[in-house]
Amino acid sequence: MLIKTQADGFLHPVSSDITPQGIYTGRRDMVRLMASGVAGAALAGWAGRQALAQTGPKLAGAKSAVPGAVTMEKVTDYKDASTYNNFYEFGTDKADPAKNAGTLKTTPWTVEVEGLVKKPAKYTLEDLLKLSPMEERVYRLRCVEGWSMVIPWVGYSLSALIKLVEPTSSAKFIEFVTLADPKTMPFVGSRVLSWPYVEGLRMDEAMHPLALLTFGMYGEVLPNQSGAPVRLVVPWKYGFKSGKSIVKIRFTDKQPATAWNKAAANEYGFYSNVNPDVDHPRWSQATERRIGEDGLFAKKRKTLVFNGYEAQVGQLYAGMDLKKNF
Ligand SMILES: Nc1nc2c(c(=O)[nH]1)N[C@H]1C(S)=C(S)[C@@H](COP(=O)(O)O)O[C@H]1N2
Ligand SMILES: [Mo]
Protein backbone atom coordinates (compact mmCIF):
# COMPACT_ATOMS: atom_id res chain seq x y z
CA MET A 1 0.00 0.00 0.00
CA LEU A 2 1.02 3.57 -0.43
CA ILE A 3 0.66 5.68 2.64
CA LYS A 4 1.71 8.88 4.27
CA THR A 5 3.43 8.50 7.59
CA GLN A 6 2.25 10.75 10.36
CA ALA A 7 5.77 11.89 11.03
CA ASP A 8 6.94 13.25 7.70
CA GLY A 9 3.87 13.36 5.49
CA PHE A 10 5.90 11.65 2.79
CA LEU A 11 4.27 9.03 0.58
CA HIS A 12 5.86 5.74 1.53
CA PRO A 13 5.61 3.39 -1.41
CA VAL A 14 5.94 -0.34 -1.16
CA SER A 15 6.18 -3.39 -3.39
CA SER A 16 6.32 -2.55 -7.08
CA ASP A 17 6.30 1.19 -6.49
CA ILE A 18 9.47 1.52 -4.44
CA THR A 19 11.04 4.97 -4.70
CA PRO A 20 14.47 6.11 -3.55
CA GLN A 21 12.99 7.48 -0.32
CA GLY A 22 11.30 4.14 0.39
CA ILE A 23 14.49 2.24 -0.27
CA TYR A 24 16.44 4.65 1.87
CA THR A 25 14.04 4.25 4.78
CA GLY A 26 14.19 0.47 4.41
CA ARG A 27 17.99 0.43 4.41
CA ARG A 28 18.21 2.73 7.39
CA ASP A 29 15.83 0.45 9.27
CA MET A 30 17.86 -2.57 8.20
CA VAL A 31 21.12 -1.02 9.40
CA ARG A 32 19.56 -0.28 12.77
CA LEU A 33 18.15 -3.79 12.98
CA MET A 34 21.43 -5.39 11.93
CA ALA A 35 23.10 -3.50 14.78
CA SER A 36 20.53 -4.87 17.22
CA GLY A 37 20.96 -8.41 15.93
CA VAL A 38 17.31 -8.84 14.92
CA ALA A 39 17.89 -8.99 11.18
CA GLY A 40 20.61 -11.60 11.62
CA ALA A 41 18.17 -13.82 13.46
CA ALA A 42 15.59 -13.29 10.75
CA LEU A 43 18.02 -14.31 8.05
CA ALA A 44 19.06 -17.41 10.00
CA GLY A 45 15.40 -18.36 10.32
CA TRP A 46 14.95 -18.00 6.63
CA ALA A 47 17.94 -20.14 5.79
CA GLY A 48 16.69 -22.95 7.99
CA ARG A 49 13.24 -23.13 6.49
CA GLN A 50 11.48 -24.16 3.32
CA ALA A 51 9.08 -21.28 2.92
CA LEU A 52 8.02 -22.36 -0.55
CA ALA A 53 7.00 -25.93 0.11
CA GLN A 54 3.71 -27.05 1.56
CA THR A 55 5.05 -29.18 4.37
CA GLY A 56 3.39 -27.92 7.52
CA PRO A 57 1.37 -29.84 10.11
CA LYS A 58 -2.06 -30.86 8.82
CA LEU A 59 -5.23 -29.06 9.83
CA ALA A 60 -8.33 -30.50 8.26
CA GLY A 61 -11.70 -28.81 7.95
CA ALA A 62 -15.06 -30.14 6.77
CA LYS A 63 -16.42 -28.35 3.74
CA SER A 64 -18.43 -25.40 5.06
CA ALA A 65 -22.20 -25.30 4.66
CA VAL A 66 -22.35 -21.54 5.29
CA PRO A 67 -23.94 -19.89 2.23
CA GLY A 68 -21.28 -18.36 -0.02
CA ALA A 69 -18.40 -19.88 1.93
CA VAL A 70 -17.00 -22.03 -0.88
CA THR A 71 -16.34 -20.36 -4.22
CA MET A 72 -15.86 -22.67 -7.18
CA GLU A 73 -13.20 -20.44 -8.70
CA LYS A 74 -9.75 -21.85 -9.31
CA VAL A 75 -7.72 -21.91 -6.10
CA THR A 76 -4.49 -19.88 -6.10
CA ASP A 77 -1.33 -21.99 -5.96
CA TYR A 78 -0.01 -22.49 -2.43
CA LYS A 79 3.34 -21.16 -3.54
CA ASP A 80 1.79 -17.84 -4.56
CA ALA A 81 -0.43 -17.58 -1.48
CA SER A 82 2.54 -18.23 0.82
CA THR A 83 5.15 -16.05 -0.87
CA TYR A 84 3.18 -12.98 -1.96
CA ASN A 85 2.05 -11.50 1.34
CA ASN A 86 1.34 -8.32 3.23
CA PHE A 87 2.58 -8.59 6.80
CA TYR A 88 4.37 -5.32 7.46
CA GLU A 89 5.78 -6.49 10.78
CA PHE A 90 8.14 -8.55 8.60
CA GLY A 91 8.80 -6.01 5.86
CA THR A 92 6.89 -4.12 3.19
CA ASP A 93 7.93 -6.11 0.13
CA LYS A 94 5.56 -8.91 -0.89
CA ALA A 95 8.40 -11.43 -0.59
CA ASP A 96 9.54 -10.24 2.86
CA PRO A 97 7.07 -12.10 5.12
CA ALA A 98 7.98 -15.51 3.65
CA LYS A 99 11.67 -14.68 4.09
CA ASN A 100 11.49 -13.09 7.53
CA ALA A 101 8.59 -14.61 9.46
CA GLY A 102 10.57 -17.70 10.49
CA THR A 103 11.35 -15.87 13.73
CA LEU A 104 7.69 -15.59 14.75
CA LYS A 105 7.17 -17.73 17.83
CA THR A 106 3.66 -19.21 17.72
CA THR A 107 3.85 -21.47 20.79
CA PRO A 108 2.82 -20.80 23.46
CA TRP A 109 0.11 -18.45 22.18
CA THR A 110 -2.76 -16.85 24.03
CA VAL A 111 -5.62 -14.66 22.88
CA GLU A 112 -7.09 -12.36 25.50
CA VAL A 113 -10.77 -11.52 25.19
CA GLU A 114 -11.65 -8.41 27.15
CA GLY A 115 -13.81 -5.31 27.35
CA LEU A 116 -17.59 -5.26 27.24
CA VAL A 117 -18.25 -8.97 27.74
CA LYS A 118 -19.78 -10.92 30.61
CA LYS A 119 -17.15 -13.63 30.37
CA PRO A 120 -13.72 -12.19 29.66
CA ALA A 121 -11.19 -14.97 29.10
CA LYS A 122 -7.65 -15.76 28.19
CA TYR A 123 -7.66 -18.55 25.61
CA THR A 124 -4.66 -20.66 24.81
CA LEU A 125 -4.31 -21.63 21.17
CA GLU A 126 -5.19 -25.21 22.18
CA ASP A 127 -8.46 -23.96 23.73
CA LEU A 128 -9.28 -22.03 20.58
CA LEU A 129 -8.58 -24.96 18.27
CA LYS A 130 -11.15 -27.05 20.17
CA LEU A 131 -13.79 -24.36 20.54
CA SER A 132 -15.77 -25.16 17.40
CA PRO A 133 -15.52 -27.67 14.52
CA MET A 134 -13.03 -26.70 11.80
CA GLU A 135 -14.45 -25.83 8.39
CA GLU A 136 -12.83 -25.28 5.04
CA ARG A 137 -13.86 -22.01 3.39
CA VAL A 138 -12.68 -21.14 -0.10
CA TYR A 139 -12.72 -17.34 -0.13
CA ARG A 140 -11.65 -14.65 -2.55
CA LEU A 141 -9.31 -12.21 -0.83
CA ARG A 142 -9.08 -8.78 -2.47
CA CYS A 143 -6.26 -6.47 -1.42
CA VAL A 144 -6.85 -2.72 -1.56
CA GLU A 145 -3.77 -2.57 -3.81
CA GLY A 146 -5.67 -4.19 -6.69
CA TRP A 147 -4.78 -7.88 -6.58
CA SER A 148 -6.74 -10.90 -5.43
CA MET A 149 -6.34 -14.58 -4.60
CA VAL A 150 -8.61 -17.55 -3.92
CA ILE A 151 -7.57 -19.39 -0.77
CA PRO A 152 -8.94 -22.46 1.03
CA TRP A 153 -8.87 -21.32 4.65
CA VAL A 154 -9.47 -23.53 7.69
CA GLY A 155 -11.26 -22.17 10.74
CA TYR A 156 -14.70 -21.46 12.13
CA SER A 157 -17.05 -18.50 12.31
CA LEU A 158 -15.83 -15.81 14.67
CA SER A 159 -19.40 -15.73 16.00
CA ALA A 160 -18.75 -19.03 17.83
CA LEU A 161 -16.21 -17.28 20.05
CA ILE A 162 -18.29 -14.11 20.40
CA LYS A 163 -21.31 -16.05 21.66
CA LEU A 164 -19.18 -17.81 24.29
CA VAL A 165 -17.92 -14.62 25.91
CA GLU A 166 -21.39 -12.98 25.98
CA PRO A 167 -20.99 -9.37 24.86
CA THR A 168 -22.93 -6.87 26.96
CA SER A 169 -25.64 -4.75 25.32
CA SER A 170 -23.27 -1.78 25.16
CA ALA A 171 -20.69 -3.67 23.02
CA LYS A 172 -20.98 -2.19 19.52
CA PHE A 173 -17.57 -2.91 17.98
CA ILE A 174 -14.72 -5.36 18.28
CA GLU A 175 -11.09 -4.39 18.15
CA PHE A 176 -8.52 -6.97 17.02
CA VAL A 177 -5.02 -6.37 18.30
CA THR A 178 -2.19 -8.27 16.67
CA LEU A 179 1.25 -9.17 17.98
CA ALA A 180 3.89 -6.44 18.03
CA ASP A 181 7.09 -8.07 19.25
CA PRO A 182 10.22 -6.15 18.27
CA LYS A 183 12.36 -9.16 19.20
CA THR A 184 10.85 -11.42 16.55
CA MET A 185 9.27 -8.96 14.12
CA PRO A 186 12.06 -6.96 12.46
CA PHE A 187 9.91 -4.10 11.17
CA VAL A 188 7.91 -3.37 14.32
CA GLY A 189 9.39 0.00 15.17
CA SER A 190 9.63 1.15 11.58
CA ARG A 191 7.55 4.25 10.97
CA VAL A 192 5.43 2.80 8.18
CA LEU A 193 2.51 2.10 10.57
CA SER A 194 1.84 2.56 14.26
CA TRP A 195 2.13 -0.73 16.13
CA PRO A 196 0.50 -2.95 17.11
CA TYR A 197 -1.48 -3.42 13.91
CA VAL A 198 -5.08 -2.98 15.01
CA GLU A 199 -8.24 -3.73 13.08
CA GLY A 200 -11.92 -3.55 13.92
CA LEU A 201 -15.41 -4.64 12.96
CA ARG A 202 -18.90 -3.52 13.88
CA MET A 203 -20.60 -6.14 16.05
CA ASP A 204 -23.05 -7.29 13.35
CA GLU A 205 -20.18 -7.65 10.86
CA ALA A 206 -18.19 -9.71 13.34
CA MET A 207 -21.24 -11.91 13.99
CA HIS A 208 -21.77 -12.60 10.28
CA PRO A 209 -21.11 -16.31 9.62
CA LEU A 210 -18.64 -15.51 6.82
CA ALA A 211 -16.26 -13.70 9.21
CA LEU A 212 -13.73 -16.46 9.81
CA LEU A 213 -11.43 -17.03 12.75
CA THR A 214 -8.68 -18.74 10.80
CA PHE A 215 -6.05 -21.27 11.88
CA GLY A 216 -5.07 -22.93 8.64
CA MET A 217 -5.00 -22.89 4.87
CA TYR A 218 -4.66 -25.56 2.17
CA GLY A 219 -5.36 -28.24 4.78
CA GLU A 220 -2.43 -27.20 6.96
CA VAL A 221 -1.69 -24.99 9.92
CA LEU A 222 -1.14 -21.39 8.77
CA PRO A 223 2.42 -20.65 7.74
CA ASN A 224 3.88 -17.79 9.79
CA GLN A 225 3.78 -15.32 6.91
CA SER A 226 0.02 -15.87 6.58
CA GLY A 227 -0.69 -14.83 10.17
CA ALA A 228 -0.03 -17.90 12.32
CA PRO A 229 -1.30 -19.15 14.60
CA VAL A 230 -4.62 -17.32 14.37
CA ARG A 231 -5.91 -14.54 12.13
CA LEU A 232 -9.13 -13.15 10.83
CA VAL A 233 -10.42 -13.46 7.27
CA VAL A 234 -13.26 -11.09 6.34
CA PRO A 235 -13.85 -11.90 2.67
CA TRP A 236 -16.14 -9.00 1.69
CA LYS A 237 -13.64 -6.38 2.90
CA TYR A 238 -10.26 -5.31 1.64
CA GLY A 239 -7.52 -7.63 2.86
CA PHE A 240 -6.11 -5.24 5.44
CA LYS A 241 -9.22 -5.75 7.62
CA SER A 242 -8.06 -9.36 8.12
CA GLY A 243 -5.58 -8.94 10.97
CA LYS A 244 -2.81 -11.53 11.33
CA SER A 245 -1.39 -13.13 14.46
CA ILE A 246 -4.11 -11.88 16.80
CA VAL A 247 -3.35 -11.63 20.52
CA LYS A 248 -6.28 -9.58 21.82
CA ILE A 249 -9.98 -9.27 21.01
CA ARG A 250 -11.53 -6.27 22.74
CA PHE A 251 -15.25 -5.46 22.82
CA THR A 252 -15.96 -1.72 22.90
CA ASP A 253 -18.74 0.84 22.53
CA LYS A 254 -16.63 3.03 20.22
CA GLN A 255 -15.46 2.55 16.66
CA PRO A 256 -11.85 1.36 17.00
CA ALA A 257 -8.93 3.42 15.69
CA THR A 258 -7.48 1.07 13.10
CA ALA A 259 -3.92 0.95 11.78
CA TRP A 260 -4.47 1.99 8.17
CA ASN A 261 -7.15 4.51 9.05
CA LYS A 262 -4.75 6.15 11.50
CA ALA A 263 -2.03 6.18 8.83
CA ALA A 264 -4.20 7.78 6.13
CA ALA A 265 -7.84 8.39 7.03
CA ASN A 266 -8.74 9.80 3.60
CA GLU A 267 -7.46 6.64 1.89
CA TYR A 268 -8.52 3.81 4.22
CA GLY A 269 -11.91 4.05 5.86
CA PHE A 270 -13.16 2.00 8.79
CA TYR A 271 -15.58 -0.08 6.71
CA SER A 272 -13.34 -0.82 3.73
CA ASN A 273 -15.91 -2.98 2.02
CA VAL A 274 -14.70 -4.00 -1.42
CA ASN A 275 -16.41 -1.56 -3.77
CA PRO A 276 -15.58 -1.08 -7.47
CA ASP A 277 -17.55 2.20 -7.44
CA VAL A 278 -15.47 3.90 -4.77
CA ASP A 279 -11.98 4.65 -6.01
CA HIS A 280 -9.01 4.90 -3.74
CA PRO A 281 -7.95 8.58 -3.89
CA ARG A 282 -4.92 7.57 -5.94
CA TRP A 283 -6.18 4.64 -8.02
CA SER A 284 -9.31 2.96 -9.34
CA GLN A 285 -10.83 -0.04 -7.55
CA ALA A 286 -12.87 -1.13 -10.57
CA THR A 287 -10.59 -4.00 -11.59
CA GLU A 288 -8.15 -6.43 -10.05
CA ARG A 289 -5.34 -8.78 -10.97
CA ARG A 290 -5.67 -12.43 -9.88
CA ILE A 291 -2.30 -13.51 -8.51
CA GLY A 292 -0.76 -16.44 -10.35
CA GLU A 293 -3.26 -16.47 -13.21
CA ASP A 294 -2.91 -13.14 -14.89
CA GLY A 295 0.40 -11.81 -16.14
CA LEU A 296 1.26 -8.33 -15.09
CA PHE A 297 -0.02 -6.98 -18.39
CA ALA A 298 -2.88 -9.41 -18.88
CA LYS A 299 -6.47 -8.28 -18.92
CA LYS A 300 -7.74 -7.54 -15.45
CA ARG A 301 -10.89 -8.88 -13.81
CA LYS A 302 -13.79 -6.69 -12.81
CA THR A 303 -13.93 -6.19 -9.07
CA LEU A 304 -17.30 -7.15 -7.56
CA VAL A 305 -19.20 -5.16 -4.97
CA PHE A 306 -18.57 -6.67 -1.51
CA ASN A 307 -16.00 -8.83 -3.32
CA GLY A 308 -18.85 -10.95 -4.69
CA TYR A 309 -20.47 -11.55 -1.27
CA GLU A 310 -23.28 -9.02 -1.69
CA ALA A 311 -26.05 -11.62 -1.44
CA GLN A 312 -24.68 -12.67 1.95
CA VAL A 313 -23.63 -9.36 3.52
CA GLY A 314 -25.42 -6.59 1.62
CA GLN A 315 -28.17 -6.29 4.22
CA LEU A 316 -25.63 -5.32 6.89
CA TYR A 317 -25.25 -2.00 5.09
CA ALA A 318 -28.85 -1.30 4.06
CA GLY A 319 -29.51 2.43 4.08
CA MET A 320 -25.84 3.36 4.51
CA ASP A 321 -24.10 5.71 2.09
CA LEU A 322 -21.24 3.46 0.98
CA LYS A 323 -19.37 6.36 -0.65
CA LYS A 324 -19.30 8.24 2.64
CA ASN A 325 -18.74 5.11 4.72
CA PHE A 326 -15.93 3.75 2.56
N1 LIG B 1 -0.76 -7.96 11.50
C1 LIG B 1 -0.96 -7.70 10.20
N2 LIG B 1 -2.07 -8.18 9.60
C2 LIG B 1 -2.28 -7.94 8.27
C3 LIG B 1 -1.37 -7.15 7.53
C4 LIG B 1 -0.22 -6.65 8.20
O1 LIG B 1 0.63 -5.96 7.61
N3 LIG B 1 -0.05 -6.96 9.51
N4 LIG B 1 -1.63 -6.91 6.19
C5 LIG B 1 -3.02 -7.00 5.74
C6 LIG B 1 -3.18 -6.94 4.29
S1 LIG B 1 -2.93 -5.42 3.55
C7 LIG B 1 -3.62 -8.00 3.55
S2 LIG B 1 -3.97 -7.84 1.89
C8 LIG B 1 -3.75 -9.35 4.15
C9 LIG B 1 -2.89 -10.30 3.37
O2 LIG B 1 -3.08 -11.62 3.79
P1 LIG B 1 -2.28 -12.78 3.01
O3 LIG B 1 -0.83 -12.41 3.06
O4 LIG B 1 -2.59 -14.01 3.75
O5 LIG B 1 -2.77 -12.78 1.61
O6 LIG B 1 -3.33 -9.38 5.51
C10 LIG B 1 -3.71 -8.26 6.28
N5 LIG B 1 -3.38 -8.47 7.68
MO1 LIG C 1 -3.96 -5.57 1.47
Image: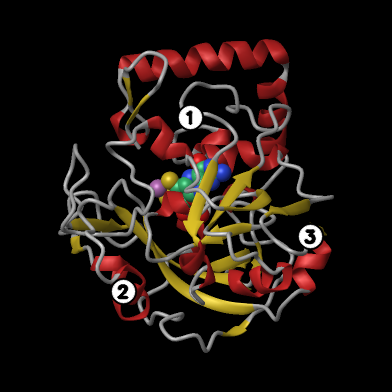
Q: Which residue was labeled with disc 1?
A: 193
- The residue depicted at 34 percent of the width and 53 percent of the height is 272
Q: Give the CA separation, mark 3 to mark 2.
A: 32 Å
> Mark 1 near ligand 1 (CB under 8 Å)?
yes
x and y percent of residue 59 in the render?
A: 70, 72
x and y percent of residue 206 in the render?
A: 52, 65
- The residue depicted at 31 percent of the width and 62 percent of the height is 293
**Is any part of residue 83 visible from this angle?**
no
Q: Is residue 26 left or right of residue 143?
A: right
The circle drawn on residue 314 is 2
Observer-nearest of 56 and 188: 188
Q: Which residue was labeled with disc 3?
A: 125
In the rendered structure, which disc, 1 or 3, sits on the residue that comes first in sequence? Answer: 3
Amino acid carrying label 2: it is Gly
Q: Is residue 140 left or right of residue 254?
A: left
Q: Dot 3, how many residues are within 10 Å of its Cα: few (below 14), some (14-19), or many (20+)? A: some
Number of numbered discs overlaid on the protein picture: 3
Q: Give the CA separation, mark 1 to mark 3.
A: 27 Å
Callout 2: helix, strand or loop? helix
**Is any part of residue 55 visible from this angle?**
yes
Q: Quadrant of residue 131?
A: bottom right
